[in-house]
Image (cartoon, helix red, strand yellow):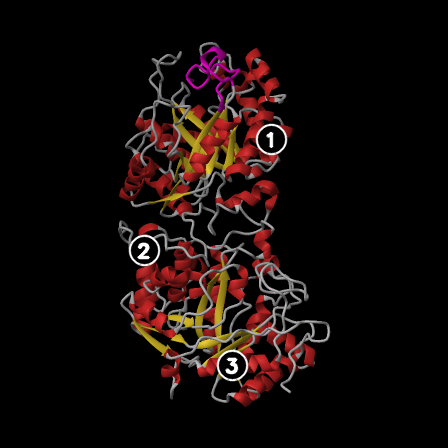
Amino acid sequence: MTDPSVNLDRFWSRRPGPEEALALAELPVGTSLLELAAALRDQGFGSLVTYSPKVFVPLTELCRDVCHYCTFAKRPRQLSNVYMTEHQVLDIAGRGARAGCHEVLFTLGDKPESRYRAAREALQALGCESTVDYLLKMAGRVVEQTGLLPHINAGVLSADQMLALKEVSVSQGIMLESASARLAAPGGPHHGSPDKDPAIRLANIALAGQLKVPFTTGILVGIGETRLERIESLLALRELHDRYGHIQEVIIQPFRPKPGTLMADHSGADDDELKWSIAVTRILFGPEMSVQAPPNLSPDTEIELIAAGINDFGGVSPVTCDHVNPEAPWPQLAVLKKNTEQANKLLAARLPIYPGYISADSSWVSPPIANALLRHVDASGLARTDNWVPGELTKAPFSVGQFKKVHKGSHIGRIEKRLDQGLELSETDIVQLFNARGSEFDEVCQLADELRRSAVGDTVTYVVNRNINYTNICSYRCGFCAFSKSSTLKGLRDKAYVLDIAEIVRRAEEAWERGATEVCLQGGIHPDFTGETYLEICNAIRSALPALHIHAFSPLEIQQGAATLKISVRSFLEKLKESGLSTLPGTAAEILDDEVRRIICPDKLTTSEWLEVVETAHQLELPTTATIMFGHVDQPYHWARHLRRIRDLQAKTNGFTEFVPLPFIHQEAPLYRRDSCRQGPTFRESILMHAVSRIVLHGHISNIQASWTKMGRSGIAQLLNAGVNDLGGTLMNESISRAAGTRNGQELPPREMDQLIASVGREPLQRTTAYGRPIGDRVQSSYRAEPLKELYFGPVSSSTTTPQPTA
């Protein structure tokens, strides 16, 4: 059966042409075919195999078609309700939401009203003209009431129907089944089913591409088609996808004969033929296409399906059965996970829309459904796997180190070898680290903690300091910021304010009395502030407290101050240094990639401007911190670029003292309130940001800091096992995260900081801003600090809009 002219080696780097594809029909299910398919799959999807946690809603089981293998379609007399009621639909969707599902699959027969009077009468009673009208209504109600994401399998649709359903769903689909018209002839499985005409179905799939609808399709294996017809069907789908780019997954579904149907005695698809079909599909479509095989139709063969080249199991429901194949129960998720791990893969939940269709380009998803989609998606475009959000008083959803190691020679190990060889990690390497899940996640955390131990030992440091945010009035409109106020009008949480110089100095003096070694000063970019404002603040604090370290002013404030004085950034930094400034916070970095900055802070510093200000400070021996604010519209490749830019600047200047990941606090952020971003990073992403930062910056920046105001105490305990060695400051006051919605408090006093660190078996140690040891009575004073006095913000009016000098 083997044709020696079919040389598979040529397809490692390119897809077969049509003639080459047809020649594959002669190949057996051999090792070379399966190995090629599996390798191509690994190029595109690595170690991940996905599934969609879903519920199945059979809105109606009436259908005008009479497929000879189908048990889904019923006659009206077989049904108590021709259409599911709204209550039934919402009950299923609600149970799915509570069970952690993300998808609601609407499956229904084709145009039943064209065949059955009962359907027409039921639709009239429902106030709907067609089945699609009722589907549109129910899908919208599911989104409104439960937030689940509909995927629509409604058969052949018109352009208007498809566009209307795009408003209430993230994806749609129709199985091609086969492109062979022969199967619709008398005696064939599609005879008497007008909607199974392959020309009609291919035209409908093309229409979805024209309308930019993310689409699912596939073929049936074993309904009487030949291998050549199977390949011709796949080539027809490939041609459409090449033209429109809209097919997000190809399902290879084995036909299983069902009692009581005209094809009950048909032999169906054997396992080898299914594996051959999967492998050929992978080879024809290449590494990027998602190839799926339903696990419930091939029970206990998940390992073999993976070996044949699939990367996805499709929808699996913890709530509902497979109504199309009710005799085939879904596998238990634990079993699916175990079998996936035995195939040296990791099982991950996805959404009914694939990552490549979720982007700032909203043309694939309509705005109404995009808002719901953002509640479900993580930074990689897969499903959020926990309900943890930064800033909330919630327990960590899992512990670092809980995953069983199942991989040998993983790409994490290869990245570790690159580090051992002194090689810098590429953007691709870093993205792979950020995509780690399961046992690979633990490998990343373990590597990060080993590097932490070798770099700084087991002590965990922190600084006793005070945050003073001298104004929240700001002329910038950053989409992530809930702290700034544009005027003296009352905001969502706080009134606009400006502290006068006397209050700034009073807070600094109180901080000194409470053992602080540092005061951190930042504020909004007040339209009336000039560079002189910042110089006056520094001079006043230095005059009152010459030993107190002034850590102040973001690169944005530096640029603004220099511009108002009409001098260079270098000259302004020199003046600030003469006035007592010792270090700068590396905030306003957000994501150092202008693709993101154009969305979240379009009027702010560009990436190059931020780097230029910081490099200038380093040249003047003014060290800075470095930060990243993540979990909004960003993706792992943005994080990788950010880390590489920080690493490259540090290699040049050695001016960064620490790197500080800052999870986005979404609750009050304008961007979130406009439904334009995610609800912060997941817990997994937050842990990985710290761990990957440790790995990427190893040998460049020794200190990786975690923000207790954002991560909470429970989260901090896990981060201390993932590369973190510093917990920042005790703060005394914290206004910016609190304004955004954090509930983790404004101060973590030294005694509580020590207890938190000791609870994970690490040694606490107070430090200075420059990571030295506090001198004199600083440490003792911090442990006997009196409660803070009530804060004074002062009135804000048109005559008192900038800090006033002390009388």
Q: Which residue is mark 2?
A: 399
For marks 2 and 3 on the same chain, the one whose residue lies earlier in the sequence: 2
Q: In the rendered image of this protein, does residue 757 appear above or below residue 778? A: above
Element on which disc 3 rests:
helix
Element on which disc 2 rests:
loop
Q: Which residue is mark 1?
A: 162
Residue 337 in the magenta stretch? The answer is no
Magenta part of the chain: 59-82
Checking the image for residue 780, the label placed there is none
For marks 1 and 3 on the same chain, the one whose residue lies earlier in the sequence: 1
Between residue 319 and residue 595, name the one nearer to us: 319
Query: What secondary structure is the magenta-colored segment mainly?
Result: loop
Task: Please state the horizontal and vertical placement of residue 471, each as a whole percent of the image.
Answer: 61, 72
Observer-side mark, 1 or 3, equals 3
Residue 574 appears in the picture as rendered = no
3D distance between C-alphas at marks 1 and 3 = 63 Å
Quadrant (top left/top right/bottom left/bottom right) for the C terminus: bottom right
Task: Please state the horizontal and vertical placement of residue 81, each as a whole percent of the image.
Answer: 49, 18
Q: What residue type is disc 2 on?
A: Ser
Q: Which residue is mark 3?
A: 508
Looking at the rendering, which quadrant does residue 722 occupy?
bottom left
